[in-house]
Each structure stands twice: as structure tokens, then as C-alpha cells.
Amino acid sequence: VIVLVALAIAVASGVLGSVTSQLDSRTTDSDEARSSLYAEAWNGALDSPFIGYGTPRPSEVLPDGPPIGTHGQFWIVLYSHGVLGGGLYALFVVHRFWRTGTGSPIQLWSKVALFIAVLQLPIYGQLPQQLFVIMAAAALPIVAERGGLGDPATEAPTVAA
């Protein structure tokens, strides 16, 4: 019943038509442009594997299109900081996801945030706000495991003299 009501609201409000028109406007040109940007980012990273290019640059294949390395956090790190930087960044995010447990709510939700970050790594950028959330999700379980996050309801605040 809930699904039918939601579908009726979507049709009546025009949201469904907007979504279908967006999906219909997607073409293979968009996929080809994204693929060529990925290829340029990869080739650029191979040309400068240790230090990268520092920042995205205009595409030679698509001069009127978006800069190289702007279609996913992995690609921007790979192109801007080289193969070593891209590999270490991806390894860090995957490692923190793998090592984060699910024993407490902090660990569980940190693992969920890191899982989403791993899935989105090659597709979406994570600057600026998302990167802060990812790093907090990576750090909070470590702090909690070391006993740094107590229960604020039961612990008295400490006052520095």
C-alpha cells in the first residue's frame, strides 16, 4: 500500500516524469566521455607515477569537457598524485573498511560510511565535505577501541586547571 501511495504521489507531482526524462537523456556519449576521461587519467598517472600532475588539467580528447581526473575521487588522486598516491589512498579506505568492526554503534555506522566511500571511490568526488566524513569514520573506531570515547551521560567532565 505504501509503495502504491508513493507511486501515485510521484506520478501526480510530476517527479516520475522528471526522473524518466533524466534517464532518457543519458546517452552513450556520456559514457564514452567518462570512459575517455578515465583513460586519460590512467595514462597521465602512468606518465608521472610518483608525483602526478598536482591538479586536474584540461582534456586533450574533450577540450570543451571537464578536466582530467574530476570524475571520481580515485581518479583525481591518481592523476594529481600519481600511481603511488592513488594506490595508497584507495588502500587506506579499503583497509579502514576491512579493519572496522561492528561491535558498537560507532563501529557499525563508521563501517557503513566507509563501505559507501569504497563503492563511490571510482565514481564520485569526495571533496570537500565527504572527505571529512570519511576520515572521521576511519578515525572514530580507532579512538573507540582505545577507550577514548566514553559514555558522556555517565562520565563527569574534566576541567583543566
Image (tube, rainbow, N blue to C red):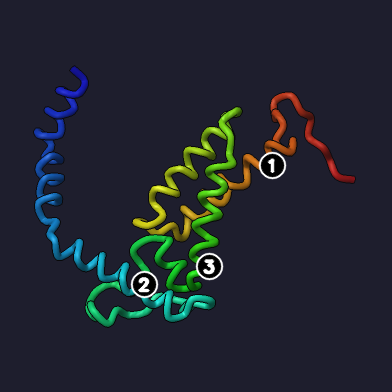
Q: CA distance from mark 1 to mark 2?
A: 36 Å
Query: Which residue occupies 39% across, 77% down?
Result: 44
Type of the residue with mark 1: Val
Callout in the foreground (3, 1) = 3
Indicate which disc residue 85 carries: 3
Indicate which disc residue 41 carries: 2
Q: Position of residue 43 (x, y in %)?
A: 36, 75
Left or right: 71, with 110 as reference point = left
Callout in the foreground (1, 2) = 2
Query: Which residue occupies 37% across, 57% down?
Result: 122
Type of the residue with mark 3: Gly
Specify which label sits upstream in the sequence, 2 or 3.
2
Specify which label sits upstream in the sequence, 1 or 2.
2
Element carrying mark 3:
helix
Pointer 1 with pointer 2, Cβ within 8 A: no
Left or right: 81, with 11 as reference point = right
Element carrying mark 1:
helix
Q: Residue extending furthest front? A: 46
Q: CA distance from mark 2 to mark 3?
A: 13 Å
* Quadrant housing the C terminus: top right
Query: Which residue occupies 60% across, 28% down?
Result: 103
Residue 12 higher or lower than 95, as above or below: above
Q: Mark 2: few, some, or many residues within 10 Å (few <14, many ≥20)?
A: many
Q: Position of residue 113 (x, y in %)?
A: 48, 42
Left or right: 100, with 22 as reference point = right
Q: Residue extending furthest top? A: 1
Label 1, on which residue? 143
